[in-house]
Amino acid sequence: MDRLIAAASRALAAGDPVTALKRVALRGDPEALALRGIAMAQLGELTRAKELLRQAARGFGPEEAIAHARCLLAEAEIALVARDLNGPAQKIGATGALLEACGDLANAAHAACLEARRLLLIGRLDGAERTLTGLDFLALPLASRTGYWLAAAGIAMRRIRASDARAALDQAALAAREAGIPSLAAEVRRALEALDAPAARLIGSDGEVLLGLAEVERLITSGTVVADACRTVVRAGLTVVPLASRPVLFALVRALAEAWPGDVPRETLIARAFRVRDADESHRARLRVEIGRLRKALGKLAGLNATKRGFVLRPHGGQAAVALAPPTEGEHAEVLALLADGEAWSSSALALALGVSPRSVQRALEALAVAGEVQSFGRGRACRWTASLLPGFPTSLLLPAPAPRG
């Protein structure tokens, strides 16, 4: 084994890219190029890192399939960190399967962990959970185990399982300490801050209250009828009525839940549901139709009673009713929520994560840029958007170093 290559590999595994570069900075063989690319990625120079990894991949011959696949995996991880979710990041699963078939179980497990994080980013929670469950945790390199627990915590947070999320972050902190890599410990601290931050607003007749994730979990398991604007559903315990495709019905039930146990005037319901200022008889007729549809949709959870001035929500079983909303709302709030992770996103990745057209995201980004809430850097396909004042680069890129040939 080449002494300098081995020393650079050890430095990268320990999270020390500067020392790794000192060992291989002047070399142009494929192994050195791959290690230089990984080091540059850890330092945040993602464009240069991709160039080096592509050169390394071209330098490995047909008989060096494992080394070539490792370069592809490293490039895919860079794409994932750069929030380029439509390119090499989509090939993580296939690359991991190739590595497993070739007997490189450590990097195959690392690839599965990356795939879980990709699926989590685009909201595919079931797929992310299956991928994490199916990977060989003991095969993961020490530096990759923190990423495993961060992905598990992210899934738990999205599923509103606060205790599971905290337990996973405790494991992530332990893994980061065992790895001895400060950047991993910093990423765990940021995740803990996100877990402790307000997760939603409780809106009722008494006003608004910010809730943490654990409080949200207790609320939605209490049997209270919740008009959940975070997921556009109405829920009570295990019963969930999805209304994402019926925005008028959700606007009505949210207004009624916010006012419970009081009623809501017809004019207010018309304004909230139809977004008009001056109601006429046609709006009142339409309101009656939509109230009938809502009454049918909520049959398992609550009834709707007419009052002299409007309508009132009557949860079954004497339960209470409240509305739950994101901590902040407004136009383009979903885009800002994704950018709040501090990473630099491409508009195409935002569109993929939100399930909308790229042009819709582009219009939202342009409006937010005019308002000074986001900014971009780069041009064309390399353009990235961030909510921070300076382009943020990740600290979590800790790729298993390719083993040298020979």
Image (cartoon, rainbow, N blue to C red):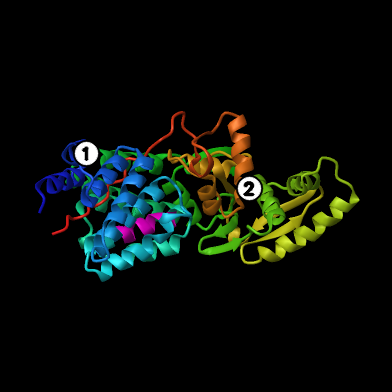
Quarter of the C terminus within the rendering: bottom left
What is the secondary structure assignment of the residue under circle 2? helix
Q: Decide if residue 382 is on the left or right side of residue 151.
A: right
Image spot of residue 185 (x, y percent):
26, 40
As drawn, 213 above or below 244: above
Q: In this rendering, does residue 77 appear at all? A: yes
Work out whether 187 lies above or below 240: above
Does 113 appear in magenta? yes
Question: What numbered label is drawn on residue 403?
Answer: none
How far from the left and from the top, in percent, is residue 378?
49, 36
Residue ID at (43%, 33%): 391
Q: Which of disc 1 and disc 2 is earlier in sequence?
A: 1
Q: Amino acid at mark 1?
A: Ala
Residue furthest right in the image: 281
Q: Residue 14 magenta-drawn?
A: no
Residue 291 locus on image (x, y percent):
76, 58
Q: Is residue 367 left or right of residue 304?
A: left
* Residue 110 image offset from top left, x and y in percent: 28, 58
Between 401 and 148, the residue placed more toward the observer is 401
Tell me the kind of residue under disc 2.
Answer: Arg
Magenta residues (range): 110-120
Q: Which residue is mark 2?
A: 359
The answer to which of 224 and 145 lies nearer the viewer is: 145
Q: Residues within 10 Å of mark 2 (few under 14, many from 20)?
A: few
Total marks placed: 2
Residue that mark 1 sits on: 25
SS for callout 1? loop
Classify residue 44 by image quadrant: top left
